[in-house]
């Protein structure tokens, strides 16, 4: 079941975004597809679609800081269309890296260096792990595999996309909002890293991250757990930017590592 999103309003140029949920796709080679028309009026009242209980991630003061970081390169590409109807958008994980923080090591300087390209994670090709037999929450094409408290850091790899300006970069499931907190985005302004809970009006932010308390999630949901969240991006175009929503999840033991 889906409903209209409250935070992201319908774009003034009337584009309708239709999402094929990643949960319908399984296997390491599967790809999530998004479709959007380049132009044309939208029926009155259309908004980006979201799961029923998606909410803003909380900002927690003095949160328990993870000692693990998972870097995820998300590649977004446009697949040439036929000229009739909407074009497909392909979303895949192309590289993943893990890093353990030293005692007392802060995440912010690492992310700043990552944004400046003065720090390079130990990237590797993603490995897909199957879900448990007869799992009620099987891993999908956009599932991440993790069961410890982690900073999940996304880097967008695309020619014409960024986190939506002046809006939240992430949301999470309302009944699991205690597991996903403190969302941030980072962009370069005059060559210097700038961060915030949302990109400003001139930001071209391609790095975003949040804290995922997967250890607590795993304890509260024994067996195979899986918790969804959304990323909010926009595809840049001279005729007007097109907002899209992507819905990965993180869980264990299935998913990409």
Image: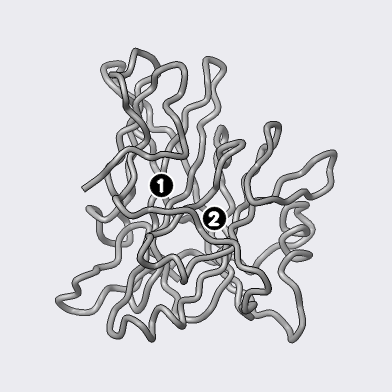
* 229 to 149, vertically: above or below: above
* 133 to 203, vertically: above or below: below
At label 2, counting other C-alpha atoms closer than 10 Å, the crowd grade (few under 14, some 14-19, many 20 or more) is some
Camera-nearest residue between 194 and 123: 194
Q: Earlier in the sequence, mark 1 or mark 2?
A: 2
Q: CA distance from mark 1 to mark 2?
A: 14 Å
Image quarter of residue 126 = bottom left
* 53 to 38, vertically: above or below: below
Task: Residue under label 2, please give it.
Answer: 73
Colour mapping used in the image: one colour
Q: How many marks?
A: 2
The disc at residue 246 is 1
Secondary element at tag 1: strand
Picture residue at 60% right of the left edge, 72% below the top: 69
Image quarter of residue 78 = top left
Picture residue at 45% right of the left edge, 38% below the top: 77
Picture residue at 32% right of the left edge, 75% below the top: 225
Camera-nearest residue between 204 and 94: 204
Quadrant housing the C terminus: bottom left
| Residue 74, position as x, y percentages in the image | 50, 51
* 130 to 245, vertically: above or below: below
Please name which of the two marks, 1 or 2, marks the residue nearer to the observer.
Answer: 1
Picture residue at 79% right of the left edge, 58% below the top: 118
Secondary element at tag 2: strand
């Amino acid at each position: 079941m889906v409903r209209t999103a409250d935070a992201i309003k319908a774009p003034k140029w009337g584009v309708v975004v239709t999402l094929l949920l990643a949960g319908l796709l399984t296997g390491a080679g599967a790809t999530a597809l998004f479709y959007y028309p380049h132009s044309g009026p939208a029926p009155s009242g259309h908004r980006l679609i979201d799961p029923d209980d998606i909410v803003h991630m909380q900002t927690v003061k003095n949160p328990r800081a993870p000692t693990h970081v998972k870097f995820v390169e998300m590649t977004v590409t446009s697949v040439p269309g036929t000229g009739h109807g909407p074009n497909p958008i392909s979303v895949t994980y192309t590289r993943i890296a893990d890093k353990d923080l030293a005692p007392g090591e802060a995440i912010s300087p690492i992310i700043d260096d990552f944004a400046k390209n003065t720090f390079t994670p130990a990237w590797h090709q993603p490995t897909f792990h199957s879900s448990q037999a007869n799992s009620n929450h099987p891993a999908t094409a956009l599932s991440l595999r993790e069961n410890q408290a982690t900073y999940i850091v996304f880097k967008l790899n695309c020619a014409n996309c960024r986190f939506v300006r002046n809006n939240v970069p992430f949301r999470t499931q309302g009944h699991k909002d205690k597991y996903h907190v403190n969302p941030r985005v980072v962009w370069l302004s005059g060559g210097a890293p700038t961060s915030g809970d949302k990109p400003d009006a001139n930001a071209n932010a391609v790095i975003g991250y949040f804290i995922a308390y997967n250890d607590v999630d795993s304890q509260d949901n024994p067996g195979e757990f899986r918790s969804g969240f959304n990323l909010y991006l926009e595809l840049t175009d001279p005729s007007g930017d097109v907002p899209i929503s992507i819905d990965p999840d993180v869980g264990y033991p299935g998913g990409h590592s």
